[in-house]
Image: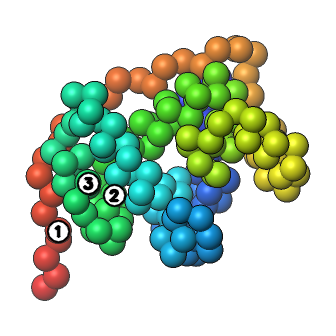
Amino acid sequence: MADYKSFKKLISAMESSDNPDVKHPPVKKGVNKGDTAIGQYGLMPNTIRELANRAEKSGQETISDDIIQSSSNLQIEDMLKNRPELMDLYVNRLMKHVMDKSKNNPEEAYLRWLYGHNLPDNRIQRLKKSDDKTMKRMRDIINTKHLMSEQPDLLQIPEEPFVDKPYSPKKSK
């Protein structure tokens, strides 16, 4: 893959077939049991809370990070659906995290995205060998969408100006 933009396209294709209005089914087991992923990138509410907490601990907290930590899953979903720039902030944070942990290997990074961003390397290697269906689909998407590049190194996520503002839900008329 050439850059984070290509990796983001892979995530969108894998998680939602590029559909920003996808309705994800509830998770059936594990730490996210009963929760539903959000949007075309399939972000989980608990993951978003963890990313907000990490931002706070690193001194990079935004107003929304503070609000998210005490919000319900439905409130988080509403915030991200109504503020695409906020969705991008969390997608970019998680992309950086999984790519760093995977030493810029997009296949391993996606497996972390799908199965758990904090999984140890040995678990990722086992998944890489055992989840043939995901691996085949991922490689097909990479090839058909031409997400591979001659460049071996990924570029950094571009620094985009992010201006946070207090959240206020839309009022229905």
Residue under numbered circle 2: 80
Image quadrant containing the N terminus:
top right
Q: Give the Cα separation between the discs numbered 3 and 1.
A: 17 Å
Q: Are marks 3 and 2 in contact (CB under 8 Å)?
A: no
Residue 90, x across and y down, in percent: 39, 44
Q: Is residue 128 visible?
A: yes
- The furthest residue to the bottom: 173
Please state which amino acid type lies under the numbered disc 2.
Leu
Residue 28, by quadrant, is bottom right
Mark 3 or 1: the one toward you: 3
> In the image, which disc is placed on residue 16?
none
Residue 94, x across and y down, in percent: 47, 39
Report crowding for label 1: few under 14, some 14 to 19, many 20 or more residues within 10 A (C-alpha).
few
Q: Is residue 77 left or right of residue 4?
A: left
Q: Is residue 133 left or right of residue 2?
A: right
State the residue in front, 136 or 118: 118
Q: Give the Cα separation between the discs numbered 2 and 1.
A: 11 Å
Mark 2: secondary structure = helix
Please state which amino acid type lies under the numbered disc 1.
Pro
Residue under numbered circle 3: 69
Residue 111, x across and y down, in percent: 69, 44
Image quadrant containing the C terminus:
bottom left
* 27 is higher (above) or lower (below) than 130: below
Q: Which callout, 2 or 1, points at the residue further toward the start of the chain?
A: 2
Q: Which callout, 3 or 1, points at the residue further toward the start of the chain?
A: 3
Report crowding for label 2: few under 14, some 14 to 19, many 20 or more residues within 10 A (C-alpha).
some
